[in-house]
Amino acid sequence: THPARCPEEARLGAAATQRLHALLNSGAVTLHPIDRDTDRYGRKLRRVEVNGRGVGDTLIAEGLARPYRGRRMGWCV
């Protein structure tokens, strides 16, 4: 979340970054292709798993991320 639009978004963004770092260093990382290879900027799109569990699923379950719904949704009230 850069730039953050409010203090709460900044706090959650920092917490999500720390948690992602911890997850990626906690076990075997596996990348899986999804329905398309790249985004419109040419970046590779992959599902990331650590020890067989989706990193995105973990962050969503912990309230540090949201499922993508076709557009960015802010965290500010």
Image: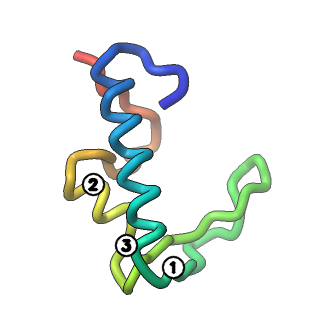
The reply, left or right, for residue 26 in relation to residue 34 is left
Say which amino acid is labelled 1.
Answer: Val
Element type where label 3 sits in the image = strand
Query: Which residue is tagged 3?
Result: 54
Q: Nearer the viewer, mark 1 or mark 3?
A: 1
Mark 1–mark 2 Cα distance, whole angstroms, equals: 18 Å
- Using residue 49 as the reference point, say whether residue 12 is left or right of it: left
For badge 2, the amino acid type reads: Ile
Specify which label sits upstream in the sequence, 1 or 3.
1
Kindly report the distance in space between the C-alpha atoms of the residues bearing marks 1 and 3.
10 Å
Q: Residues within 10 Å of mark 2 (few under 14, many from 20)?
A: some
Q: Secondary structure at mark 1?
A: strand
**Residue 11: image location, x then y, percent:** 32, 28
- Pointer 1 with pointer 3, Cβ within 8 A: no
What residue is shown at x 34% (from left), y 78% (from top)?
53
C-alpha gap between disc 3 and disc 2: 10 Å
Q: Which mark is residue 29?
A: 1
In the rendered view of the protein, which quadrant contains the C terminus?
top left
